[in-house]
Image (spheres, grey):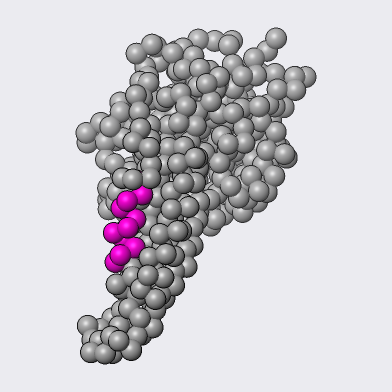
Amino acid sequence: MTQSFPQLLAELRETEHEFIAIRRDIHAHPELGFAETRTAELVARKLAEWGYVVTTGVGGTGVVGQLRRGTSSRTLGLRADMDALPIQEATGLPYASTVAQTMHACGHDGHTAILLAAAHRLATRGDFDGTLNVIFQPAEEGLGGASKMIEDGLFTRFPCDQVFALHNAPGLPVGHFALRHGCMMASSDSVTITVTGKGTHGAMPQLGCDPIVAAANIVLALQSIVARNIEPTRAAVVTVGAIHAGSAPNVIPETATLKLSVRALDSETRDLVEARIRSIAQLQAQTYGATAEVDYRQISRPLVNHRGAADLAIETIEALAGPQGYTLMPEAVMGSEDFSWMTEVVPGCYVVLGNGVDSTGGCAVHNPAYDFNDAAISWGAAYFVGLAERCLSVP
């Protein structure tokens, strides 16, 4: 490092107004997953102005900026997400969303601004030797943007020895980080079970095959998976969040549909849960003379922080915020993050950065009253700059 972290943080704060303006512009013009065209254009334009070699359209609307310095073959990836959520904003802010039913309710506008601030600092005054890849990912919110970028050759076209990402955390003070070694967040799968029977008049059930009865028994049988199939020391969740069938009290419908959310903290458990859901759905349906079709979609994998990358993250945070500037999480959480697809391919680490407490940044994400705390931009940018200058240190 060519300078102290207090000096770096002070320098980033001198220019943070530029990135606050960018963040608020993105906030006012939110775009859903795989439709982030305006955001991607803004990101690409800024990176090109700063001297990055820019590639657009990676995995749909993803953007990668590449910057080479020196002669080292070492490579690093820093990732931010860009998509918004289908939520009607209720903040009343001057820069509130101008798009109906679309809002940056998870802070991806802030994550994009953080990585842009870091990219600018590394381009103008960065002290590193190697190749830096700044990755702006589309469609993190359940649409598989990370896996799409990987399928489009992300890590073959832009090799990375390690990859890092962060997420804001309401309830933690700005400038405070949290992470853990190993699994940090759960996998997330979305499952639709369509039970097909035979419709008939409700007064003559013997002439049909009731898919609602079969679906109800599938729901009950699914409860046995975590209770009786999963080792008690492991964690999993099987939630039936929606049941749709019929429209009249005196008509037995042709079909009934169940929608499930499934989570686990390791791949072995995740695979076991999937196998049991498929088996239970099909066999329970057969018991009642119906059939069941299972549409099982992997949204994200368990998010695992690799030890070496996590140790480097801790070293960087300690230099930035001191030994009291981070918390080692005792347990993983059942939330999910599709950055997990990236850490399955490349060693990496994911951290959370405080968004503030109570009325200043403490509102939970995915809430119509949420807003990203602009005071976190320079902290996040300093963390990314520190990682880059450590991973790609000058000999």
Q: Can you see residue 11?
A: no
Residue at (43% x, 48% y) in the render: 273
Image x and y of residue 290, in percent = 40, 75
Image x and y of residue 99, in percent = 40, 59
Q: Can you see residue 307?
A: yes
Q: Number of callouts in the render?
A: 0
The C terminus, quarter of image: top right
**Residue 344 picture quarter:** top right
Residue in front for this viewpoint, 215 or 62: 215
Main secondary structure of the magenta stretch? helix
Residue at (34% x, 85% y) in the render: 208
Residue in front for this viewpoint, 166 or 381: 166
Residue at (57% x, 25% y) in the render: 121
Q: Is residue 74 left or right of residue 335?
A: right
Residue 217 lies in the magenta stretch: yes
Image x and y of residue 362, in percent = 26, 36
Extent of the magenta region? 216-226
Up-down: is 267 above or below 306? below
Q: Is residue 232 left or right of residue 166?
A: left
